[in-house]
Image (cartoon, rainbow, N blue to C red):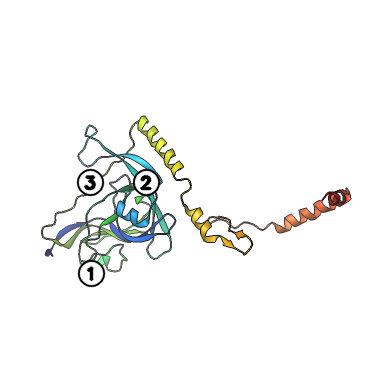
Amino acid sequence: MSARAERESILLQTATAYIQDKCKRQGSSSKILFESGSQRSFVTQALRDKLQLKSERKEKVVIKTFGEGDNSKKVSKFLDVVTIKVKHKGRNSFTAVEALCVPRICGSISKVFDRSKYDHLRDLELADTFNAVSIDYPVGVLVGIDFYHDFFSGKTKTGKSGPAASKTVVGWVLSGKVKAKVKSEEDSYCFLNFRCSVESDSDRQLKESFDRFWEVENIGRKDCVVHQFEQDIVHTGERYQVKLPFKPDHDTIPDNFKTSEKRLVSLKKRLEKSDLVKRYNEVF
């Protein structure tokens, strides 16, 4: 095991949160990196496999990093788009994130430091842990600027020294300079921004074709409605019964029984006056 020495290091905005698939059938804790320099959000293939995330479509993206100009060689790939839900800290609510699936985001970026040295951090409920146990956890999700502000409240706390704290739905995330224990041979991490875009009219047409293709391919696959149908269906001994697939947060449907009953009584009276009831009874 490598020795760790305390020196000035940089904390990036990280959190550890519970991640679920769109239908909330599979879940797992994962390290999240908040990166405002990335135009898109990403999820690793390992986390996708664990949550059994289905591809909603494919996108052709062009990846550019720091120092590359418009004339630089472009690296383009078709990536699967999946949806995850991030659980809020201490609450049974979630933030949905649409992310591109990649083999790997980055290596371990956590640091070990003593928060008690910084007065402004002592009473905060942090989104991440900074101990030797969690330091080697890989990043499973990168939240880019497309969903970055869905997590942050805008409230921050700073002290005379140490990292700044920003409040999010998953707890307070830290960023900035800190005295941390790192491996003696460890280099500083520098994250470069990703620029993802769809190229030219022909590429957009190709993307639309792929979207239509995946929409057709996804027909018949289990979605949230099908899953709920399978959970609610029951057999009474004579027939099957199933609930209507209402959304969980739908408005209460008003009871119009009295109005319908009055209309039925009124219709019956009109039919009796015109002798139609008797004629109907003769037929049926």
Residue at image x 46%, y 41%?
A: 216
Q: Is residue 269 visible?
A: yes
Residue at image x 23%, y 52%?
A: 106
Q: Badge 3: how crowded within 10 Å, few (<14), some, or many (20+)?
A: few
Mark count:
3
Q: Badge 1: how crowded within 10 Å, few (<14), some, or many (20+)?
A: few
The image shows residue 53 at horizontal and vertical percentages of 38, 52
Residue at the spot of label 2: 81
Which of the labelled discs sits on residue 116, or is there none? 1
Relative placement, left or right, of 238 versus 111 is right
Give the Cα distance between marks 1 and 2. 41 Å
Residue at the spot of label 3: 192
Relative placement, left or right, of 18 versus 139 is right
Q: Amino acid at mark 1?
A: Ser
Q: Amino acid at mark 3?
A: Leu
Relative placement, left or right, of 224 versus 2 is right
Q: Nearer the viewer, residue 184 or 122?
A: 184
Q: Amino acid at mark 2?
A: Val
Q: Is residue 165 visible?
A: no
The tag earlier along the polypeptide, 3 or 2, is: 2
Q: Secondary structure at mark 1?
A: helix
For the N terminus, the quadrant is bottom left
The image shows residue 191 at horizontal and vertical percentages of 22, 49
